[in-house]
Image (tube, rainbow, N blue to C red):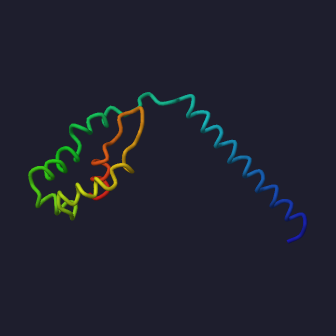
């Protein structure tokens, strides 16, 4: 590869990087202009009442320990013990309503 080809290749990569940077900045600018309409989508607001965690997981945990075991491969007492061990790490501090540590652990082991 001679000197002119090297210079052409370097110029090509520089132009490519400039293009990608400009495109990224444009997308960031558009995102800021559009913004979000909601913090939480309307459909997701129904999750605490209609989600699988409420309708299946908690029902099995409270009433059907055999099905809970098939679902998680651990007993209710083992799940509670594991939850006590990791609860502090799964707790999120936020201004918005966040998922409970029990939900996060259930989602992980499910």
Q: Position of residue 35 (x, y in %)?
A: 51, 30
Q: Position of residue 42 (x, y in %)?
A: 33, 32
Residue drawn at (86%, 60%), measured in percent from left and top? Answer: 7
Q: Position of residue 106 (x, y in %)?
A: 27, 53
Using the image, determine if residue 30 lies above or below residue 78: above
Quadrant of the frame with the N terminus? bottom right
- Which residue, as the protein is rendered here, is positioned at the far bottom? 1
- Which residue, as the protein is rendered here, is positioned at the far left? 63
- Which residue, as the protein is rendered here, is positioned at the far right? 3
Which of the 4 quarters of the picture holds residue 44? top left
Relative depth, front residue between 21 and 38? 38
Using the image, determine if residue 105 lies above or below residue 32: below
Quadrant of the frame with the C terminus? bottom left
Relative depth, front residue between 20 and 32? 32
Using the image, determine if residue 1 lies above or below residue 60: below
Using the image, determine if residue 97 lies above or below residue 75: above
Q: Position of residue 46 (x, y in %)?
A: 26, 35
- 107 lies left or right of 27: left
Residue drawn at (65%, 39%), measured in percent from left and top? Answer: 25
């Amino acid at each position: 590869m001679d000197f002119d080809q090297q210079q052409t290749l370097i110029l090509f990569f520089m132009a490519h990087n400039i293009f990608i940077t400009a495109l990224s900045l444009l997308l960031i600018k558009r995102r800021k202009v559009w913004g979000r309409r909601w913090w939480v989508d309307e459909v997701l607001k129904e999750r605490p009442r209609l989600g699988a965690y409420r309708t299946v997981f908690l029902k099995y945990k409270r009433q059907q320990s055999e099905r809970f075991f098939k679902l998680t491969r651990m007993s209710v007492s083992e799940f509670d013990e594991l939850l006590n061990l990791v609860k502090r790490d799964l707790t999120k501090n936020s201004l918005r309503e966040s998922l409970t540590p029990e939900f996060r652990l259930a989602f992980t082991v499910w």
